[in-house]
Image: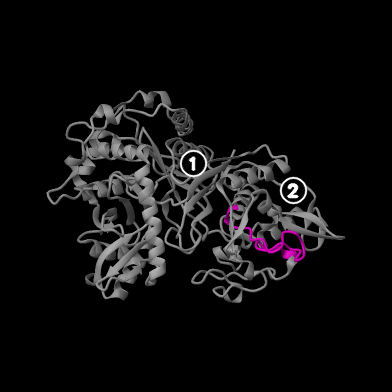
Amino acid sequence: MPVVAAQALTLRFGLGSEVGLQEVGNQEAASLLVEDVDGYPLVYLTVQGPEAAGGFWEAARAAVAAGEGHYLVATGASTLYSPTLFADTGTDTLEHLLSVVDGMGGPEAVARVVGFNEPGRFFLVDREGRYWDAYTGEVLEGETLAHLTDDFHDTVERLAEEDDYRAEMAHVWACLLGEASEEECLAEDASAAALEARQTEAELLGKLGYDPVSLQRAEVQPQAEGMDLAEMTGPDGELDFVRAQGVIAKGGAGNFSSFEEVKPQWRKKYCAGWFCYGEYWVLEARDKDTNKVRKDYEWHTVGGNWQNWKHYGYRWKDCFDSGHNDQYPPNAPNGGYYEGLRHFPRQFKDSNWKNFTYWHVTDPTGPHQALPIGCGPAAFIRLISWYQFERNQYRGWANINWYGGSVPDLYYGPTSNWYYMFRKNSWLGGRMLAFRKQNYGGSKAYYPDLIVKMGTKALSGQGMTTPRGFFNGGNAWLDERGSWLNLRGAWYYGSPTTAVRWGMYSLAMDSIGVRGVPGIALYHVDPTALGEHYAPTLEGRLYNWRTTAEVLVRIPWYETGGPNDGKFLNITGILPTLRAGGYYALK
């Protein structure tokens, strides 16, 4: 894969969001090839911004020093992989990468850079053959390296069996590289899933003030002469940003956006050139007053946060560990939370069973004792909490009181004091929403019935919820409360089919774009830890390649303590997924 393609895709990712349309000519970029464990091209890492000049390491240091206006994108380095796989709109990934490089003795100590199944996780191989985690700085042990290698080879085997997926990716790359005809690049998937996706696009275009019919009739020439990738390639084989700005200006290219600062640029009756192949959407659910996404780390009202319960002293993985019910985790001294972050005082001690931890059934003798709730039910609770406490602030719609007017207070007994219920729920990170009252003998206790509805199982001390179980259990919880909302979802096991990718695309566009509400992403994390993880998301970057679709979502900050936190991750590609993936939303 030519490096110019990686740099052009990096520009396209940030065009109209990280990079203003009039700022393109002032950009610089540098790329680094990441190989797979067998030495074949895996992804390109490209850093872009006004100061990102020189070789990759030099550009990375300049980007970190400059800060704002620089970003990093991982793009496929082979036609086997998706064009855009991972993106950091800040410099966090680069900061960690440079810190590890310096610890190794500088760039000259790096023999090669290797990746496995996670496109945002890289390993620096030194001259002695040791693998350094480019995010944590840890040296991989032999058993861990073998585990990562085996999992990646499983992905390679799946790729070998997925003829349709390989053909779709090859077609997309052929259009991006100018190796396909205009007629081929304008061909569209006519399946029911693709048609539903286009209808959802039309709804969002109408919301943004456009006539979808007029846009559909616009003349599109993705392979127009003098407007292709070759036209933007400089003498050194890399992207010439001045030429790229000319192609954008002459071709009428831009992106569709669901927020107001960046007006969509598709106002002309035609679109010609490289940037006109497919459609690219920048979607964000924003606060109705500030017109900004309320990040995890920015909202501390009454000490709570709908996306992130870690303000209460527990790292993400502690919710899987049945041994942490009666003690603070080792990395959260004095009731603070994840090491290195801010510290918030606990309002109640989780060792008191009346405060209902996520991780244990409150009755130690009950039939569901010591059952970990897991990230699946917890993510659903976080989504439900948004509808109970945040929906009005984002959408102006009424919040939903899932329990009606008279709410049982979990500490002092029955009460109808709504304000106290709000405060108590905030103190407990939204966890009261998961519980219901049960009788054990003659005593009353609460247990997290959602884990039972979702069929969550304890596996190696962790809570495992299947994609189907998450869907069925979430809807059972809603039905029990007489809600008119339903949990919709599109998911897959193994490899994502075309229909599933369109389904995930439609759901993400409808939830984040059309309705401005969050969804839940199921994605792959470090296989040496948990494998797959459920997390809510408020931001998406969507690609409609006409014959297939791709969805990138921003993972919440501090979600796992890993390299994907706060970054955009492709949840529809075969590389970032190992066993399962999906997207869910309430509607």
**Which one is nearer the viewer's eye here, 370 or 345?**
370
The answer to whether residue 545 is above or below residue 467 is above
Please name whichever residue, 426 or 459, is drawn nearer the observer in this view of the structure.
459
Residue pointed to by mark 2: 403
| Residue 358 is one of the magenta-drawn residues | yes
Answer whether residue 103 is magenta in the image. Answer: no
Q: Residues within 10 Å of mark 1 (few under 14, many from 20)?
A: many
Task: Specify the label residue 9 is tagged with.
Answer: none
Q: Position of residue 354 (x, y in %)?
A: 75, 65
Region of the chain picked out in magenta, as a range: 354-376
Judged left or right of residue 340, residue 399 is: right
Q: Earlier in the sequence, mark 2 or mark 1?
A: 2
Q: Amino acid at mark 2?
A: Tyr
* Secondary structure of residue under mark 2: loop
Q: Which mark is residue 508?
A: 1
Report the residue at 49% width, 48% height from top.
Answer: 580
- 78 or 288, nearer to the observer: 78
Q: Amino acid at mark 1?
A: Ala
- Prevailing secondary structure of the magenta residues: loop
Task: Tell me if I can see residue 254 in this picture.
Answer: no
